[in-house]
Amino acid sequence: MDSKLLAGTPATTKAGFKINTSGKALNEIIENGFFTVDRKWTVTYWNKSAEKLLGVGAKDIVGKNLWDRFAGIIPLDFYIVYHKAFLQEIPNHFEEYWPEIGAWFDVITYYNNNTLSVSFKSSKQPSGGGSGKSIDNSERALPGGD
C-alpha cells in the first residue's frame, strides 16, 4: 500500500496486524472469516467472523488440531487444498459447497513462515458463475509475476 495513504493515520501493530483508528485489528473488522494454523494443523488464530460463519468459538478451537475439530464433516476438497498450500507454498483460491453448513465457501489460502492463513466467506449461492463446481486457481500466476 502506498505510504502516502497512511500518512497522518494513527496506526500501531498488534500481533503483526495493522491497527485502524478505532483500535481494532484489521483481521477483526473484516467480514471474511480468517484463521491460521501451524504445520501440525494446530489453530493459532481464529477471528470473530470465523466464529460466526463456522459456529465455533475461538476459545473452543485455538490451540487444537483443525482436523480433529472438524473430523468427518469438513469436505475433502478443503483438506486437499489446505495440504497443497503447505506443500507448494503458494496462494490458492477455491470454492466449495459444505453440506453440513448448507453454504458455499469462497476460500483463499496463503502460506508464510510455517503458517497457513485462510480467509473465507460464505453464501447460499456459488460465486463462480453458478457452475456449482469447485474452483482451484493454484496454477494461476500471481498478478505482476513472471
Image (spheres, rainbow, N blue to C red):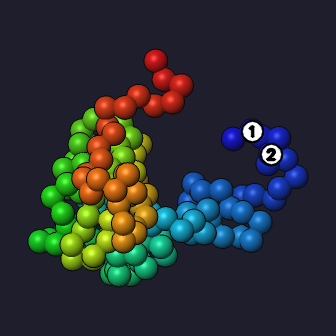
Q: Residue at x 60, y 69 (%)?
A: 29
Reading the image, the residue beneath label 1 is 2
Dot 2 amino acid type: Leu
SS at badge 1: loop
Residue at 79% over, 48% down: 6
Count the labels in the image: 2
Horizontal side, residue 143 vs residue 64: left or right? right
Q: Alpha carbon of mark 1 to alpha carbon of mark 2: how far?
A: 6 Å
Left or right of 30: which side holds 109?
left
Figure check: 108 above or below 2:
below
One can see residue 65 in this view: no
Mark 2, residue position: 5
Q: Looking at the image, can residue 6 be seen?
A: yes
| Left or right, 71 with reference to 118 | left
Graded by Cα atoms within 10 Å as few (under 14), some (14 to 19) or many (20 or more), the crowding at tag 1 reads few
Whole-percent x and y of residue 91?
Answer: 38, 41
Callouts 1 and 2 close, C-beta under 8 Å: yes
In this view, the residue farthest toward the top is: 146
**In the drawing, does residue 110 fall left or right of residue 41?**
right
Viewer-side residue, 93 vs 47: 93
For badge 1, the amino acid type reads Asp
Report x, y in % for residue 108. 40, 51
